[in-house]
Image: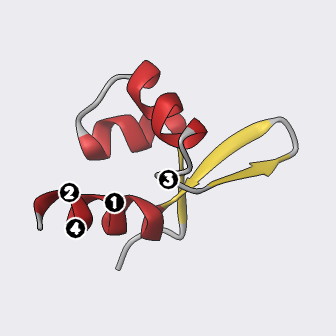
Amino acid sequence: MHAISMSVDDACRFIGIKRTKLFQLLKDNSLTRVRLGGKTLVLTSSIISFIERSVA
């Protein structure tokens, strides 16, 4: 079972990309972000879906 969301740094490590690329994916709506206070979280389900779409 995965966490529902993760920090930007954790998402980068999980996918294996740099922060610049992650923010580009967020801007392109390829990944889903949630703002909680001043912190940006990335939904784990959106990361998994993105990877599955990329592999197919």
Expressed as whole percent of the image width and height from the top left, the position of residue 38 reads: 84, 35
According to the picture, the residue beneath numbered tag 3 turns out to be 31
Q: Which of 45 and 6 is in front in this view?
A: 45
Instruction: Give the percent coordinates (x, y) of residue 52.
Output: 22, 67
**Residue appearing at x 28%, y 30% in the figure:** 17
Q: What element carries label 2?
A: helix
Query: Which residue is found at the position 55% from the left and 41% from the top?
Result: 26
Name the residue at 27% across, 44% down. Answer: 15
What residue is shown with label 1? 50
- Residue that badge 4 annotates: 52
Query: Label 2 vs label 3: CA separation?
Result: 12 Å
Asked if labels 4 and 2 touch by Cβ distance under 8 angstroms, the answer is yes
**Residue 1 x/y as whole percent:** 35, 80
Quote the CA–CA distance across marks 2 and 1.
6 Å
Asked if 31 appears above or below 38 in the picture, the reply is below
Question: Horizontally, is 20 left or right of 4 in the view?
Answer: left
Which picture quadrant has residue 18?
top left
Disc on res. 12: none
56 or 37, which is in the foreground? 56
- Discs 1, 4 touching: Cβ within 8 Å: yes
Say which residue label 2 marks. Answer: 54
Task: Mark 4: give few (<14), some (14-19) or many (20+) Cα within 10 Å.
Answer: few
Secondary structure type for disc 4: helix
- Left or right of 50? Residue 3 is right
* Amino acid type of the residue tagged 4 in the rendering: Glu
Label 2 close to label 1 by CB (< 8 Å): yes
